[in-house]
Structures are given as structure tokens and as C-alpha cells.
Amino acid sequence: MRSNSQLFINFAVFYKLSTMKKRIKKRHLRLAVICLLGIIGVTYYYLFSSLSNQDKTTYIYIDEDDDIDSVTTKLSAIAHTQPLFAYSTLARHSNYEEKIRTGRYSIKPGDGALTVFRHLKNGMQTPLNLTIPTVRTIDRFSAEMGKKLMLDSIDLYNMLTDSAVCRKYGYDTTTIISMFIPNTYDIYWNVSLDKFLDRMKRECDNFWNINRQGKAKQMGLTPVEVTTLASIIDEETANNEEKPMIAGMYLNRLKKQMPLQADPTIKFALKRFELRRIYNNLLATESPYNTYKHAGLPPGPIRIPTVAGIDAVLNHVEHDYLYMCAKEDFSGTHNFARTYQEHLENAARYSKALNERGIK
């Protein structure tokens, strides 16, 4: 009996110890699971929760002067603290500092530190929509591109005024501006100067398709000459509906070998674009751009013309007008005339309107 009783006691003790061990194991397992979930949660929060504290896509621009610290500083302006810490940790424990890639990078709401780090480290930048501005001069154009791209505006200006560079693309320093068609292009912010010019040449060639080239050829003009005339027309009016009429008038003068006598060319020659009135003494300005003194088209465009201006020349209105003068109602449109006498009458009305408004 004692042996059986002792056996029962031993069994009970063993069972109790076994049960306790199982409970301890379960407790440890639960603690391990909780810790693991905690680690996963913290890791997710730091690495995968939205780095950006903005509610829309923002962009950071990394240039050649940036280092690992300056990139982190740029991110800190739009970042939550914990994801930014995770990004900084990833950056410092990788070889990112050895090869920082320039570019324009989008930071979207929801992009975690790991995603942002991968994009920056691998150079996965976002292109921008670059619209070529219809500015008047190469220096102004260079300055505008310097604001929108990681290009040095002085380097761009020097290239566009270098005869060898212009010749490479089939132009000279007076006509190179016609290579830039004012459309909008997807392009990387850190594009190099050479690649930028190569891209603009390809876009220009695409713009001058068979249809446009055929129309220019029928008129006896080259694409550059069409662009040059379009630049004058754009300076004459912002009214796209009237541009084909003005184009027809200037083409009539060219056919008759009459000087264009376009006031905007005087402004360009003088680089005085603010002038409201062109007085007779200014017509004697010595410049190849002075279309009062020199017949035919000027050496090159006096601005980057609009696409509407170029197409206005290619699709000009056929008529027999030889003169035009701004309307006295200052509507931005013009009175057209067939004879010089009729033109003088139009000019007198416009001059009177200027005087009445005190415009000098």
C-alpha cells in the first residue's frame, strides 16, 4: 500500500511540475510573441510608416554640393521624427555617403523611410515638366533654365553664344534660339548641358515634321526663317486669331522686296523692350535687326516664338494688305491697309489716341 501511495504522490508531483513547465513555456512563448510583434511594430513604424508629414507629394533636390548630412537636413523639413531617424540610420550604415546621386526626388504621403532611402540611393528620381519660355534673349533664356534645372545659367549662356557649339546643331549664334520649341517636356532636373541641348534638338526635329517642312518649302522659307517671322508676329500681338493675318501681310512685303518695317525689331536692336512708341529718330538705329533700314528678315528670331506664332506663318491668310497699324482702341489688334495713304490715316488715329493717353 505504501509503495502505491508513494507512486501516486510521485506521479502527482511529476504532473504538477510538468504542468508548471508547460505554463512557463507558454508564458515565455507569449512573451516572445509579444516582443516579436513589438519589434515588428516598431520596425514597421520606423521603416514603413509615412516619412513625410505633408498631405501631398513634395520634392527634394539633391545637387553636387550635397553630402549625407545636408540630404538629411533637406528631408527633415518635411519628415516625421521616427521615420527620419530610420532613414538616417540606413544612410549611415550603407555606402550612400560614397555615392550620393543628384536629382529631383518625389516624397509621397505613405512612402516609408526604406522606400525613400532606396529611391535616393539608387537614383530613382522623378522627371519634371519643363516648359520652354517664350523669352526674348539668350541671357534671359539661360537664366530661366538655371532656375528650373540643375544647370549653370552662365555655362548654358556660354554654350549658346559659342559659334562651334551652335554649328554642331546646325545653327549660328543668331539662330540657335530657334532650336527651342516652347512646348512642355518631361526631363530630369539634373540633366547635363550636352544632353539638354541634344534633347532640344531632337524635339525641334520632331516638331518640324514633314507637314510643317512642306508648308515652309511651299512658301520659300526655311524653318529658321519661319521661326524668325513668327517671333516678330508674336511681338506684334498676343491675339492668336489675328496672327495669320499679320503673317500674310509680312509675307506680302517680303514678296515685293519691301522692308518689313516691324517696330519690334527696333526694340530688339536697342534692347529696350519697354518702349511704347517708336519715334523717327529710333528708326535710324544701326543694327542688322533694324527692318526699317534692312530689307528682308533679320538675322534670327527676336524671341522664342509661340507654337501659335509659328503655325500662323505656316497657315497664313492670303490677302493683299501691305500695311498695318495698332488700333486706336488699344484692343491689341490692328487696322490693315492696302495703300500707304490709307495706312497714314490709320497711323494718325493711333498716334492721336496715344497722345490723349499721355503715352510717350
Image: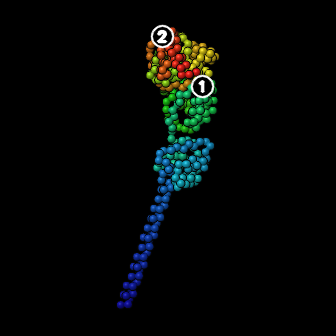
Question: Element type at marker 1?
Answer: helix
Residue bearing the label numbered 1: 166
Crowding near pointer 2: few (<14 within 10 Å), some, many (20+)? some
Where's residue 256, x and y in %? 52, 10
Question: Element type at marker 2?
Answer: loop
Q: Is residue 72 left or right of residue 2?
A: right
Image quadrant in which you'd find residue 228: top right
Amino acid carrying mark 2 in the image: Arg
Q: Which image quarter is the C terminus in?
A: top right
Where's residue 157, x and y in %? 61, 30
Residue bearing the label numbered 2: 338
Where's residue 267, x and y in %? 59, 21
Towards the viewer: 50 or 199: 50
Q: Residue at x 53, y 28 (%)?
A: 134
Towards the viewer: 317 or 172: 317
Q: Which image quarter is the N terminus in?
A: bottom left
